[in-house]
C-alpha cells in the first residue's frame, strides 16, 4: 500500500480506538490530543501524517526533529519533544511547541532563558519517574514539586502539566496504576501550585495502552507504531 494510504488507514483505526475509549470513559474525544510519534521515520512519513490530517508530531531527538521541521516549513504542524532533553540542547529545543520531558528546575530555568532570547514560548510538561527506575529519566515527586514552584518565575515558557513513561509491559492493565498515580500527583501539585500555574495536561499512553490512559484522564496520547508501523532503526525505543 502506498505510504499515504497506509498512514491514513492506521490513523482511522487509532481514531476509532480513541473515540471508543473516550466514549466508554464518558469523555469527549476533543479533550484528547493525538501526538503522532514520527521518530526514526523520514520526511515522507511526516508529509503523509500531515496529509492524513495529523497536526501534532512527536520526536525524541532534538536534531532529528529540527531537520524534519526544516524540510517541511509549509506544513501546519506542532512539534512535541517527547524524549530526554540534555540541558546543553535547551537553546535548540525551544523550537518545539511542546516539551514533554522537563525533569529539573535547572532545565526549566535554561529553557525559559533560551525561549526568552529566541522570542519563543514553548509549553512544557514535567516528566515524572514514579517507579524510581534507575535507567529512566524523569523527576521524582519532590523534584517535580520544585519544578512547579519554580514555574511561577518563568517569563517565556509555560508549564502545563505532567508526562509519564511507565515501566514497560505489553499488558495495558499494568500501566493503569502509574497513570492513576500521575493524575493524583497532578491534582496534588495543582492544589499547592503558585496561582499563575495551571497543570491541565496529562501526557500518558502509547500505541498499546492509550485506551487505559484515556480512562485514567490522559489529555495527550503519544502514538508511534500504531500510526507509522514498526520502527526498524535503532534509537527508536
Ligand atoms: C516512542 C515513544 C512513544 C511511542 O511509542 P509507540 O509504542 O510506538 O506508540 C511514546 N512516548 C515516548 C516518550 C516515546 O519515546
Image: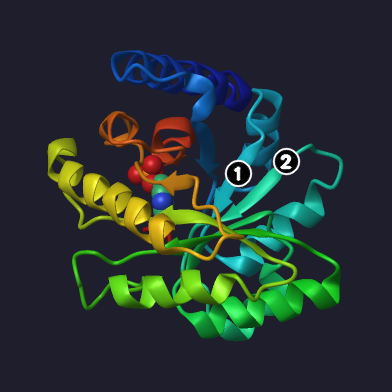
- Left or right for 121, reference 102: right
- On residue 57, the disc is 1
Residue 232 appears in the picture as rendered: no
- Residue 211 or residue 229, whichever sits in front: 211
- The quadrant of the rendering that contains the C terminus is bottom left
Q: Specify how the rendered protein is coloured.
A: rainbow
Q: Residues within 10 Å of mark 2 (few under 14, many from 20)?
A: some
Residue 147 appears in the picture as rendered: yes
Percent of width and height locating residue 166: 25, 55
Q: Secondary structure at mark 1?
A: strand
Q: Is mark 2 within 8 Å of ligand 1?
A: no
At horizontal 67% and vertical 34% (from top left) the residue drawn is 55
At horizontal 53% and vertical 34% (from top left) the residue drawn is 33
* Residue 62 to residue 21: above or below: below
First-in-chain label (2 vs 1): 1
Percent of width and height locating residue 145: 39, 72
In the figure, residue 234 lies in which quadrant?
bottom left
| Dot 2 and dot 1 residues touching (CB under 8 Å) | yes
Q: Secondary structure at mark 2?
A: loop
In the figure, residue 115 lies in which quadrant?
bottom right
Residue under label 2, please give it: 77
Amino acid at each position: 500500500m502506498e505510504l499515504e494510504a497506509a498512514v491514513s488507514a492506521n490513523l482511522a483505526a487509532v481514531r476509532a480506538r480513541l473515540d471508543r475509549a473516550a466514549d466508554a470513559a464518558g469523555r469527549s474525544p476533543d479533550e484528547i490530543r493525538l501526538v503522532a510519534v514520527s521518530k526514526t521515520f523520514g520526511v515522507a512519513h511526516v508529509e503523509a501524517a500531515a496529509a492524513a490530517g495529523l497536526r501534532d508530531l512527536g520526536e525524541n531527538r532534538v536534531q532529528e526533529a529540527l531537520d524534519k521541521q526544516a524540510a517541511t516549513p509549509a506544513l501546519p504542524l506542532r512539534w512535541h519533544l517527547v524524549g530526554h532533553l540534555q540541558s546543553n540542547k535547551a537553546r535548540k529545543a525551544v523550537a518545539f511547541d511542546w516539551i514533554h520531558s522537563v525533569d529539573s528546575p535547572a532545565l526549566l530555568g535554561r529553557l525559559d532563558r533560551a525561549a526568552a532570547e529566541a522570542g519563543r514560548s514553548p509549553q512544557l510538561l514535567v516528566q515524572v519517574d514514579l517507579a524510581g527506575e534507575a535507567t529512566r529519566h524523569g523527576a521524582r515527586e519532590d523534584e517535580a514539586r520544585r519544578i512547579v514552584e519554580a514555574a511561577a518565575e518563568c517569563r517565556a515558557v509555560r508549564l502545563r502539566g505532567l508526562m509519564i513513561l511507565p515501566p514497560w509491559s505489553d499488558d495495558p492493565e499494568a500501566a493503569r496504576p502509574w497513570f492513576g498515580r500521575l493524575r493524583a500527583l497532578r491534582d496534588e501539585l495543582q492544589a499547592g501550585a503558585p496561582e499563575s500555574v495551571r497543570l491541565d495536561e496529562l501526557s500518558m499512553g502509547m500505541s498499546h495502552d492509550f485506551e487505559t490512559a484515556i480512562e485514567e484522564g490522559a489529555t495527550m496520547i503519544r502514538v508511534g507504531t500504531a500510526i507509522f508501523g514498526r520502527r526498524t532503526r535503532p534509537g527508536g525505543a
